[in-house]
Image: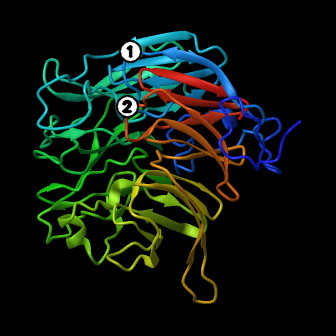
Amino acid sequence: MALALTAAGCTSSGTVSAHTWKGIAHPTAAQRDWPTYDRVASRSGVSITSPAPRAVRRSWTAAVDGLVYAQPLIVGSDVIIATENDTIYALSESTGKVRWSRHLARPVTSGLPCGNISSSGITGTPVADPAAGRLWVVTFTSRPTFRHMLWELNISNGRTVARRPIDVPGSDPRAQQERGALTLLGSRVYVPFGGLFGDCSDYKGRVVGAPVSGSGRLVSFTTPNKREAGIWAPAGEAVRDNSIYATTGNGSPVNRVDDSDSVLRLSQRLKVLGRFTPANFKQLSADDADLSSTAPAMLPGGLVFQVGKEGVGYVLNGTRLGGTGGQLTSSRVCDGGFGGDAVIGDKVVFSCFSSLRAISVIPGKNGRKPAIHGLWSVSVSPGPPIIAGGVVWDVSRSNVLSGYRLADGKTVFSASTAPVGTSFPNLAASGTRLIVPEGHKVVCYIGI
């Protein structure tokens, strides 16, 4: 018998529910899949197949050969895990047993100008095309030289279909970090680049598009600034209406825009279709207050919500970006956005430095501006949240898995995890299962 969500801090076998939340009763395979970061290219972060949770408990634990920064993917009956040891695993969703694994390259263990990931291998979340049976992933290696390699794998057995270097001419692979998730759109897979922790050396914000055929010409976008302006949030880019939305960080020199601290709308050939830059971009760059500490959130009606390290949330007209002209409204929403968000309807749940917050963005009517309404806030050092079964799930940087009721932010589940080893612990969900990376292992919870 399901209990009402009134108790805070349930144990790892706590019994919880989410009142009237209902998942899809008889989902298709495609609806169950979580094949890209936050399940869909718009990065909503919502499992549409998860029912209201009941007795949440650990189901299985699987050891892997490196830290897990990338978000798990779920395709069919497999959980796809990528590690910083440049290894891909396909685990049984029901048992956690290894169905196949592929060690693709030797990760970088030394020689970087700065950074906080060692070993550094696969950091950005791969992307799958379940219908085509393919998986794309980027490895980082220093053998024989520093380079990022894009791999196309057969998702049923891990065999290599194609591979190619993904660093474009003029870039310094040692200085570029591929932290953002890969994206599939049309006939290309898109790969975003930022810099290493510490903002050292000669990096720039970049997006590279490679044909899914495995061969053919790369397309690319590079910020025109002298250096920096990285695209580094874990979610990478978001997609809507065949356009790619990406957000850049602080750039040098600080007194020139040059696409730093901007929300960019890009075509499939990576031409800039529009951009939004806050009026105080010089101060943002001078203070290292990246606008790109979260990715753009796609809202109904063509709206875009963006929050960066400054903690100001902007509501933008996603199809009319241009200078500051795309801004419809803004408001200080927290002490600084950091990591990611989840979107359901007009609600955005997003992580900040010291809180997890939910807002609603109400579209303007009769010429009025949209309005940002705060819904709830929880004091925690959160990772990027996802939503499943009417519950917001999050692993904090202090190693606690929590579930918060979407309606009001009340805690409905809490369990300690092993050290996650990353500032951005990423989760995935499908049906009654929640997949949680915990350092060098992966834990599946059931009953969500």
First of labels 1, 2 by sequence position = 1
Left or right: 296 in relation to 34: left
Q: Indicate the quadrant containing the N terminus: top left, top right, bottom left or bottom right.
A: top right
Q: Indicate the quadrant containing the C terminus: top left, top right, bottom left or bottom right.
A: top right
Look at the image and tell me whether residue 239 can be seen: yes
Provide the secondary structure element on which disc 1 rests. loop
Left or right: 112 in relation to 400: left
Task: Work out whether 171 lies above or below 106.
Answer: below
Residue 445 % position (x, y): 64, 27
Residue 137 % position (x, y): 39, 28
Residue 119 is labelled as none
Task: Work out whether 347 lies above or below 415.
Answer: below
Tag 1: residue type? Asp
Tag 2: residue type? Gly
Which residue corresponds to the image point at 71% horizontal and 48% vertical from the top-left? 390
Which residue corresponds to the image point at 74% horizontal and 34% vertical from the top-left? 28
Residue 321 % position (x, y): 40, 72
Q: CA distance from mark 1 to mark 2?
A: 14 Å
Residue 65 is labelled as 1
Which residue is the site of mark 2? 421
Which residue corresponds to the image point at 14% horizontal and 18% vertical from the top-left? 144
Q: Nearer the viewer, residue 142 or 239?
A: 142
Name the front one of labels 1 and 2.
2
Left or right: 270 in relation to 56: left
Residue 36 % position (x, y): 51, 38
Look at the image and tell me whether residue 319 can be seen: no
Which residue corresponds to the image point at 14% horizontal and 40% vertical from the top-left? 169
Task: Determine which quarter of the picture holds residue 56.
Answer: top right
Provide the secondary structure element on which disc 2 rests. loop
